[in-house]
Image (tube, rainbow, N blue to C red):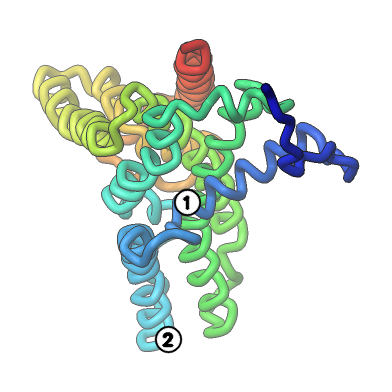
Amino acid sequence: MSEIYDIGYRHYDGPRLGRAHSTRALAVHSLRAVFGLGRTARSKIMPFALAVIMLLPAVVSIAIMALIGQRGMGYSAYAVIMQAVLATFLASQGPAIIAPDLRFRVLPLYLSRPVSIVDYVGAKVTAMTAALFLMVAVPLTLIYLGELLIDLEGPPQTKEYLGALTMALVLAVLLSAFGLAIASLTPRRGLGVASVIAVYLLASASVPIFYGTLTSTGNDAVARWAWLINPFWLVDAVQVWLFGTTPNSEGGYPPGPASAVIVVVLIAVAVSVLALRYRKAASR
């Protein structure tokens, strides 16, 4: 004898907000996860500690402007000088929005809704891009406001500030796409952190080796290309080409738009790797 139970399931008759709302909600949720919002206090220590460290040079620059009337750290140099902090932030927080979905195999749940692989990858990259951009844009804006309030001699460096903000966004997109692509290769968060750090250290360590070797043999023009191995100097080269700022590397960069082309290609390749990785993970 069988029995039928009414367990209270009802059809949803409310508004259906659609694919764009789902993607936006995923991006906001991922951005909150980057900074540990809505999670334990332990999850907030690393991102907020690194954010405070990023602000310290801005505070020092404002103090220099107020005390001796001279500008401190330049806008165009900020991201390059603070690259170790940004790389640590990417390595520690990037896998936090990548690894759990892969490890617990919840991608089919996301993709059962109108959200596609492109939407999912776009939401993750957008969230990490926004977080990295804030890490650079907030101290840059703080320095600029300090420059306006202190009223130094000469006009404010508005052009360099806006150019630095633009390059901060380009750098954030490049780091996010590349970092998340590396982190997505493993469902383990610890391995993802180690992988991103290892790639950054390898890129940073190889630059002076290649540059020193090439300059010692008289290949100065070729040696300039060595700086483009590191993503921070790569974007700095784009900044020099677009806005004519002072290079933050020894000997300068290759002339022309080559650095900009490399940035676009790297972003496209990284996003493609992410999409392929998630397509494979969703099919399991």
Q: Give the labeled residue for mark 1.
A: 33
Count of numbered labels shown in the rendering: 2
Mark 1 or mark 2: name the one nearer the start of the chain: 1
Where in the figure is residue 218, as x and y percent of width and height? 15, 19
Residue 22: mark in rendering: none
Q: Secondary structure at mark 2?
A: helix
Q: SS for tag 1?
A: helix
Q: Is residue 245 above or below residue 275?
A: below
Q: What residue is drawn where x is 49% and y is 42%?
A: 172
Q: Nearer the viewer, residue 132 or 167?
A: 132
Taking depth in this image into account, of 15 and 49 the one nearest to the observer is 15
Residue 275: x %, y % from top left? 53, 18
Q: Residue at x 31, y 42 (%)?
A: 91
* Front residue of 105 and 25: 105
> Looking at the image, which residue is at 36% across and 85% down?
68
Q: Residue at x 33, y 35 (%)?
A: 252
Question: Would residue 256 be visible to someone looking at this image?
Answer: no
Three-letter code, disc 1: Ala
Q: Residues within 10 Å of mark 1 (few under 14, many from 20)?
A: many
Counting from the top left corner in percent of width and height, residue 176 is at 46, 36
Height in image: 236 above or below 195?
A: below
Report the side of 198 relative to 271 (left or right): left
- Quadrant of the rendered image containing residue 175: top left
Picture quadrant where residue 11 is located? top right
Q: In the drawing, does residue 229 fall left or right of residue 177?
A: left
Which amino acid type corresponds to the residue marked 2 in the rendered image?
Ala
Task: Say which quarter of the image contains residue 36.
Answer: bottom left
Quarter of the image that includes the N terminus: top right
**Residue 66: assigned label:** 2
In the displayed structure image, the side of residue 37 where residue 191 appears, left or right: left
Q: Residues within 10 Å of mark 2 (few under 14, many from 20)?
A: some
